[in-house]
Amino acid sequence: PPSDGGGYYNRFARHRQQSRDAWYFFENSVFTLNNFKVITSLSLWFVSYMIMGIFGGSVAYMHFERRDKSIPDPLPDFGYDVVPYWCPRIPHVPHSNVQSVVLFILYSIILSGVALRWNPKHHPKSGTVIWGGDGRLILQHMCHLNCLVFLTRTSVVGLTGLPQPNPKCIEQQHFPVSFANALKFVMGRGFPPHACGDLIYSGHVGCTLICMAVLRRHGFMRNRLTSSLIWIIAAIGIYFTISCRSHYSVDVMLAFYFGYFLPEWYYNRSDERVGGAVSRWIRSLEVRPADLRHLHYEGINESDEKQGDSPRYPATISV
């Protein structure tokens, strides 16, 4: 007899179809290669940050020169001769300084762009991103470049102990500590870690310039007014890094070198301008349109597929 549409087999068929639709959604929207790559990038960021705190900040805190004076006794510094001490205390902010607020603003702008561009629009045949870039790739670039800052800074910050110039660290300059005590002081007071004497080079300025490189590359600064406002915010953070006596001028200058050449080094390999194993590894970590598993369009030919494999992002600007 003909079915009235409400029989057992019809209900079972609808249930199977709903199950297939749900699995298709998770397979193509959640359990994707690109999302796994993003998780890997976030994990690398966290591990690199912890490495900097343990082997960088803690060693630098243990190693900087102790003195008996009740005021900071910094080395002669040209920046201190030009920029007077001024460090307004900002409540409810990690490190309670202006440069941390500036970093928070820049990171917030980037993360807002990541959220707005998380699901990019793709060309229906080639699969390339056609508007706004890929939010996941923006997040990856921020994480990977921060990793380079964290690791390069770890390699130098604890090598030479200098007299600390920061008035907020006076109490910490009177007595020597062991590595265990330094680790407890730096890593045991919450996140993010906070140290004294971790000078060469400035992490705040380095991360500020990395944010600028990411913002510029992904089209956030195409508008002149927006670009000017963002650069003013960044300049304020750099100024207060010296005026708060958080770092010597040489720390800030070195951060400029690292903040320029690290993105240059990274993007040359990301864009396949430089070959080698490191370049292949970097590209294998990054989100690519060809990795999107749900891009199976009808009428796509071999030449279109080859175009889809090429990582072309029109919102990308060389830095």
Image: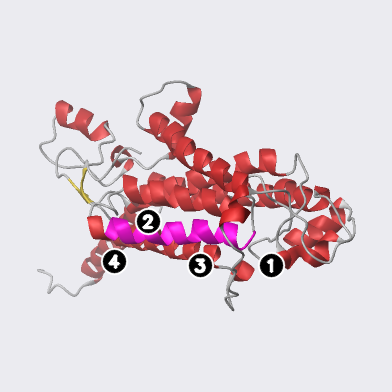
- Measure the C-alpha gap from mark 2 to mark 3: 14 Å
Q: Quadrant of residue 6?
A: bottom left
The residue labelled by disc 3 is 101
Q: Say what amino acid the circle numbered 4 marks.
A: His
Pick the front one: 13 or 46? 46
Q: Are marks 4 and 1 in contact (CB under 8 Å)?
A: no
Q: Are marks 2 and 1 in contact (CB under 8 Å)?
A: no
Q: Which of pointers 2 and 1 lies earlier in the amino acid sequence?
A: 1
The residue labelled by disc 1 is 190
Q: Which of pointers 2 and 3 lies earlier in the amino acid sequence?
A: 3
- Measure the C-alpha gap from mark 4 to mark 2: 56 Å
- Measure the C-alpha gap from mark 4 to mark 3: 52 Å
Q: Say what amino acid the circle numbered 2 marks.
A: Trp
Residue 20 is at least partly visible in this image: no
Q: Circle 4 — which element?
A: helix
Q: Say what amino acid the circle numbered 3 marks.
A: Val
Near mark 4 (Cα within 10 A), the count class, few <14, some 14-19 or many ≥20, is few
Q: Which of pointers 4 and 3 lies earlier in the amino acid sequence?
A: 4
Discs 4/2, front: 2
Tell me where the magenta segment starts and ends, as one range: 226-245
Pick the front one: 279 or 287? 279
**Position of residue 237 measured from the top left corner of the image (x, y, whole percent):** 49, 60
Near mark 2 (Cα within 10 A), the count class, few <14, some 14-19 or many ≥20, is some
The residue labelled by disc 2 is 231
Discs 4/3, front: 3
Q: Is residue 226 above or below residue 152?
A: below
Pick the front one: 56 or 35? 56
**Position of residue 267 measured from the top left corner of the image (x, y, whole percent):** 40, 35
